[in-house]
Amino acid sequence: MTGKQRTNRLRMRAGIAAAVVIAVTGAWKWNSTGVQYDTVRVARGDVEASVSAVGKLQPRRYVDVGAQVSGMILKLHVQAGVAVEKGQLLVEIDPNVQKATVDAGRASLAGLRAQLADQQAQHLLAFQQADRQRKLDAGGATRTEDVQVAEAALSSAAARIDHLKAQIDQTHATVQADEVRLGYTRIYAPMAGTVVSVDAREGQTLNATYQTPSILRIADLSTMTVWTEVSEADVRRVKAGMPVYFTTLGSAGHEPRRWHGEVRQVLPAPPSGDGKSADTALAPSSNKVVLYTALFDIDNADGELMPLMTAQVNFVSAAARNVVTVPLAALSPLQASKPEPKKIAASQRSQRFRARILRSDGKPEEREVEVGVRNRVRAEVLQGIREGELLITGERDTGAGVKRFQL
């Protein structure tokens, strides 16, 4: 090997070594930060702030049909699921006892009227005798004692007539009541609707002495009411007139059907389901979650909703459509000053956060962002971030990569 070739080879080795040093140095500089950023591109979308709760569906209008007289059910004309019209015959109860009572009352009434007729004849006779005695007394042909006896007999006959008339009125009222009870042996539908439950059977004996036995329930299923249980932590955010929607556990398909409505009212006190007095029911409890009841109505013309279905309810307290949105987890709150009263009274309160944007040169930039409607996942951006920018959502340490370049 000549000297010139040896010199060229040494220069080549030196150049390769220099290139390796430069590469390692560059790699070290690239990894000297030790951070790789996770980003998401800012885009438009919908943001909804809501209160979640669970409710039960009940018919808006329903009535429990009961028996007002005791007796055996002779005929039950309807069954569960049947549609009925107002005034339709539903149940027939054995009328024999009630009919016998009515017949006895009518007979008693007839007897009293016969006695009244007899007494009226006696009164006429007493009147004639008293009149005769008064005429004789005027001519001095009778004793004063006989006149007084005749007058007393006349007054007594009139009193007995008044007594019999009072008895007739009393008995007549009793007969009318018995006739009404006889009518109760045939039970008619008090409203149009659907028979949703039947609690009695033909041949069953009903005892209406102390309480009204329930036979069946009729409900108008065209309008349903959702009875929603709202926790005490969220109840102040639920107001009458607030939009609300819900889904049911039986919703078919990949996208559950939503029913939309409006809050009708929030009951002022939690329900008492243990039969205790109102004072006891309103007493604080240390081992129970206090739940309040919010009501809203839903049209059910298609009959998809059924009584006692479970509803997954969302009360919408604020919503923004087609706005710039970002993940709430990528924001960190700033220490906010006390907002002005007008801002507090707005439909939703704005708040300032801190966010980081990845610039086009690969460096992060800290921004102050004002957000509006927000929930647990996303927030509406009012100012501070533009659509299309890269929002930093996280970062990872990449310092381990340096080891690949160590010699």
Image (cartoon, rainbow, N blue to C red):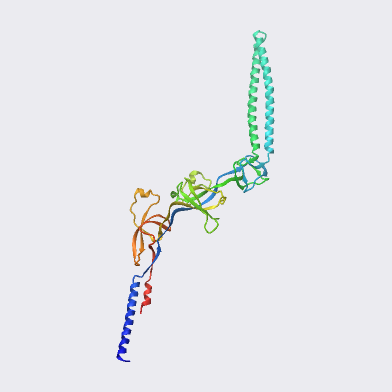
Q: Position of residue 349 (x, y in %)?
A: 38, 52
Image height of 36 relative to 196, above or below: below
Identify the image quadrant of the N terminus: bottom left
Q: Nearer the viewer, residue 282 or 57?
A: 57
Q: Which residue does the image show at 36% across and 77% down from the upper left?
A: 405
Q: Nearer the viewer, residue 340 or 385?
A: 385
* Residue 145 falls in image quadrant: top right
Q: Nearer the viewer, residue 367 or 2?
A: 2
- Would residue 163 be visible to someone looking at this image? yes
* Residue 376 falls in image quadrant: bottom left
Q: Position of residue 266 (x, y in %)?
A: 47, 46
Identify the image quadrant of the C terminus: bottom left
Image height of 46 relative to 104, above or below: below
Image height of 147 relative to 386, above or below: above
Q: Which residue does the image show at 68% across and 44% down from the upper left?
A: 75
Q: Nearer the viewer, residue 168 or 6?
A: 6
